[in-house]
Image (cartoon, grey):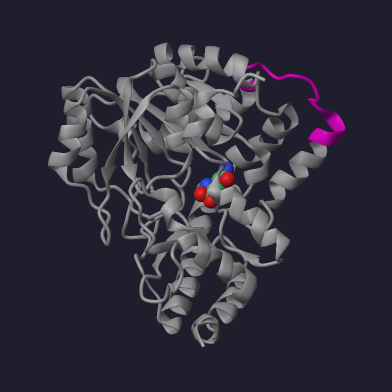
Amino acid sequence: MHKLAKRLDHFSDSVIRRMTRIANQYQAINLSQGFPDFDPPQALIEALKQAAQQGPHQYEITWGSREFRQLLAKKQQRLMNIEIDPEENILVTCGSTEAMMCAVMTICDPKDKVIIFSPFYENYGADAILSDATPIYVPLKPPTFEFDKQELRQAFEQGAKALILCNPSNPCGKVFTQDELEYISQLAIEFDAYVITDEVYEHIVYPPYQHLYLANFPGMQQRTISCSSLSKTYSITGWRLGYIIADKSIIDGCKMIHDFLTVGAAAPLQKAACAGLALTDDYYAQLTQTYMAKRQLFLQGLDKIGLSYYPPQGAYYVLVDISAFNPFKTDFEFCEWLIKEVGVAAVPGSAFFKHPEYRYIRFHFAKQQQTLIDALERLSKFKEKLLCLKN
Ligand code: GLN
């Protein structure tokens, strides 16, 4: 038999999603893969019922339903402060996962270089590999996750065609500052590079931090491919609805790739999601409040247990430093033990770092208050359980 393709040798399955499978196997509280255990807004559920009765049940326009694109253009135009034509500047995708893959495939030829900040959401490495592009990793340095400006410049000097920017950042919760985004913009313009953003946590930012859209920085509209999704904003990660907003010439390319990758996102779900896109500003303000309360509950719980972490400025993850406690060789073994013996699932931090780094595990707190309380209760016993292990 012929060997399978070589590209399979360069990445593994998703560690995030693997942890969910292990968590399910041991019925652990799953704080690994980031998705809510609460329902989307009632308006979306009602709209979904209606879509089930009235359709559509057949293919939508490949680029996304007209109504969806019109509502999205209206919402994002106001937030991003750029002009968005629903016919020319939007592509609806199957989650931001497809949006990012489609963006990288549209921009990169084989061997093109793509800058990725590390730690990074694990899909980006696979996006680059599947597009035959070569990643250049630039560290966000713990504990504050700032980057060294000189190091970033050197990465651009190597001829990078694009940079991937996850803002707010998964997994570290960093929200990029005005100064950092200006610097990134200047380099992108100077070196004629694109920036592909992943902004799925745009509505989950903790005051006083503020989300700034890179596409709105001077000179950036033509070279920014803004990817995002409805998953986190409306608690519908299983609906797989994402999108790309970019200049017409870029979107035209993305449309071609998308046409043959997936044809289109699910028609009834696009229809139902329009009820979310039509919600007013109060909804987004309430979402922030909800996540502020969850963040506070979870971080206070970690404080009580005596675990140190980087307080997230945005998104719903927290990287916890386990270096003082980990008796195992790797963070993965620690996480397996935590699932089996403590009953809580986390993602080993090494899944997010380019260079071996076993110091962190990542929890998410997109869960109901009671789920978080139960998880903290279980975690409060982890040191005792570790002691038993040693004796
Ligand atoms: N963004 C989520 C996480 O980082 C998972 C997304 C996914 O599995 N597609 O956990």
Pinpoint residue 42: horizontal percent, then vertical percent: 71, 51
Question: Height in image: 338 above or below 236?
Answer: below
Front-most of residues 31 and 200 = 31
Q: Where, quadrant-wise, is the N terminus in this rendering?
A: top right
The total of numbered circles placed on residues is 0
Q: Residue at x 25, y 54 (%)?
A: 141
Q: Residue at x 71, y 29 (%)?
A: 266
Pinpoint residue 27: horizontal percent, then vertical percent: 71, 66
Would residue 37 be visible to someone looking at this image?
A: no
Q: 1 left or right of 319? A: right
Question: Height in image: 67 above or below 95?
Answer: above
Magenta-drawn stretch contains 106: no
Residue 342: name its quadrant: bottom right
Q: 343 left or right of 189? A: right
Would residue 61 be visible to someone looking at this image?
A: yes
Q: Residue at x 46, y 47 (%)?
A: 201
Specify start and end residues of the magenta stretch as a single range. 51-65
